[in-house]
Image (cartoon, helix red, strand yellow):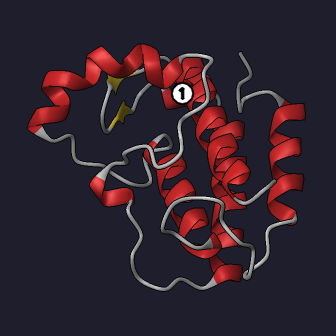
Amino acid sequence: METLFDVAVRDQFLARIDHLRPDSQRAWGKMDAAQTMAHCAMGLEAATGDTKLARPFFARLIGPFFKGWVLGPKPFSKNSPTHPQLVMKSPMNFEREKTRLVAAIRKFHDAGPASAARYEHGFVGKLTGEEWGRMQHKHLDHHLRQFGL
């Protein structure tokens, strides 16, 4: 399975993000392009230690049972549930969020798997660095497909 720690994969994502526009239409979901980029950036920032996501009690109970689904090869389904802190409802500045997402991708990639492994996922809990890389790949791909990219 692909990982965001692969240079070619990282570069493919950066190229796809470059095609995103403020008026890009989503195929599903509620967040616009700017909100989606903020959502993705915050998810990456959780894996670099720049954002702390609470791990609710229910997530501690059931999250580990979903680890295989989160990390498995099957793409996330449309309108999949998300961590409450990652739901973006306020209007966002498109260019600022695009810059933030690109920076978050680069920081995550450059820090490497050993760094990511120090941080807990907000739902499934402890992940290895490689698991973080696969999960971030899957998450970014899900949201870029949402906008036809």
| Residue toward you, 35 or 128 | 35
What residue type is disc 1 on? Answer: Trp
Please state the horizontal and vertical placement of residue 12, each as a whole percent of the image. 88, 43
Q: Is residue 5 left or right of residue 74?
A: right
Disc tally is 1
| Residue located farthest toward the left when viewing the structure as drawn | 57
| Residue toward you, 44 or 77 | 77
Please state the horizontal and vertical placement of residue 68, each as a whole percent of the image. 44, 13
Asked where in the image residue 66 lies, by quadrant, the reply is: top left
Q: Which residue is mark 1?
A: 132
Q: Is 71 placed above or below 37 here?
A: above
| Residue toward you, 118 or 36 | 36
Q: What element does badge 1 sit on?
A: helix
Please state the horizontal and vertical placement of residue 14, each as a whole percent of the image. 83, 53
Please state the horizontal and vertical placement of residue 106, each as a whole percent of the image. 72, 49
Q: Say which residue appears at 74% left-offset and 82% top-offset.
A: 23
Q: Say which residue appears at 62% left-offset and 17% top-offset.
A: 73
Q: Is 33 placed above or below 102 here?
A: below
Q: Is residue 129 left or right of residue 52?
A: right
Question: Which quarter of the rendered picture does the N terminus lie within?
Answer: top right
| Residue toward you, 3 or 31 | 31
Q: Say which residue appears at 85% left-offset and 54% top-offset.
A: 16
Q: Is residue 111 left or right of residue 119?
A: right
Q: Is 99 placed above or below 78 here?
A: below
Crowding near the residue tagged with mark 1, few <14, some 14–19, many ≥20 C-alpha atoms within 10 Å:
many
Q: Say which residue appears at 60% left-offset and 21% top-offset.
A: 74
